[in-house]
Amino acid sequence: MRNYILYGFGIALCIAGIVYLAAEYVEYLSEWGKFGCLILLIGFFALLGKHFQALGR
Amino acid sequence: MTIKSKRNLYLYLAIACFIGIIVIFVDGYLGIHDTIYFTLRERERTVGEVDYSIKYVGGDEKVFFRYELDNRRLLSYSTSIQASVWKENEKVLDLFSQDKLIIKPFDKAMVEWTLDSEELQSQGFYAGNYTEYTVKVERNGVEWRISVTYR
């Protein structure tokens, strides 16, 4: 149970960090940089989902 | 591959994606960033792109420019800056020139100049009736072109 709380806390911090970066610094990114971020963000959430799916088995 | 190692692989790949996002942001933030602001009729606006247009400046109005250079590198940055007015590919007027501007790491520099229609007219150039001039701002390899139309 404690592990799940720590995981949840870590994920919330990661998402908060990404939201902060996006709000403050997205204007400095090139179009390719924005596209790369989008792909990595999709990968990030998909892989986290797969991780928790495997954890629940 | 066991379930546990597969589970960890997903987690490591997710962490790699997160680090990739951070790296892209850091790469975008670092470097030399320049911004041009202009004030016309008491309103300051940002020149949003290297090819920009300022429309319908009055014949008796002045346009105040502010050029901000941001050095987000670990090294000092040295550059020359020139701002001039051009008409049909010929230089009409020098607005600002500095040969060596040195900016310390993670510091900013700001220069200002004014486009005065009276100065243009004193050089024999008409500023009115939809005449168009180009303000070119140059620094080491970067050129901004701001088209100014007089009404």
Image (spheres, coloured by chain):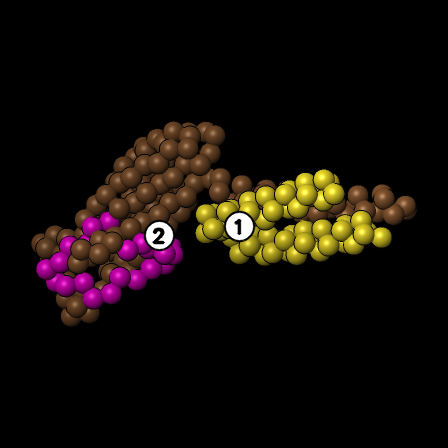
Question: In this orientation, which residue lies closer to the viewer: B99 or B33?
Answer: B33
Q: Is residue A57 above or below residue B109?
A: below
> Left of B16 or right of it: where is B63?
left
Tell whether position B102 is magenta.
Answer: no
The residue beneath circle 1 is A19
Instruction: Answer with left or right where residue A51 lies relative to residue B143.
Output: right
Q: Position of residue A49 (x, y in %)?
A: 73, 54
Residue B148 location in percent, x, y?
24, 61
Question: Looking at the magenta stretch, what is its main secondary structure?
Answer: strand
What residue is drawn where x is 27% and y is 58%?
A: B134
Question: Mark 2 falls on what kind of element?
Answer: strand
* Residue A16 in view here: yes
Residue drawn at x 63%, y 53% as measured from the top left: A41
Q: How many marks?
A: 2
Q: Colour of chain B?
A: brown
Chain A, which colour?
A: yellow
Examine the image and state in which quarter residue B75 appears: top left
Picture residue at 35% right of the left edge, 48% below the top: B35
The residue to which callout 2 is attached is: B144
Q: Which quarter of the image is occupied by the C terminus of chain B?
A: bottom left
View extreme (bottom): residue: B129
Asked if residue B131 can be seen in this view, the reply is: no
Queried whether the magenta region covers residue B57, the answer comes back as yes
Query: Which amino acid type is marked by label 2?
Result: Trp
Q: Disc number at residue B9? A: none
The residues colored magenta run B45-65
The vertical placement of B81 against B126, above or below, is above
Q: Nearer the viewer, residue B104 or B12?
A: B12
B54, above or below A15, in the image: below
Crowd tier of the residue under label 1, counting other residues whose Cα lies within 10 Å: few below 14, some 14–19, many 20 or above? few
User: Horizontal and vertical percent for residue B84?
Assistant: 25, 49
Q: Position of residue B4 (x, y in %)?
A: 85, 44
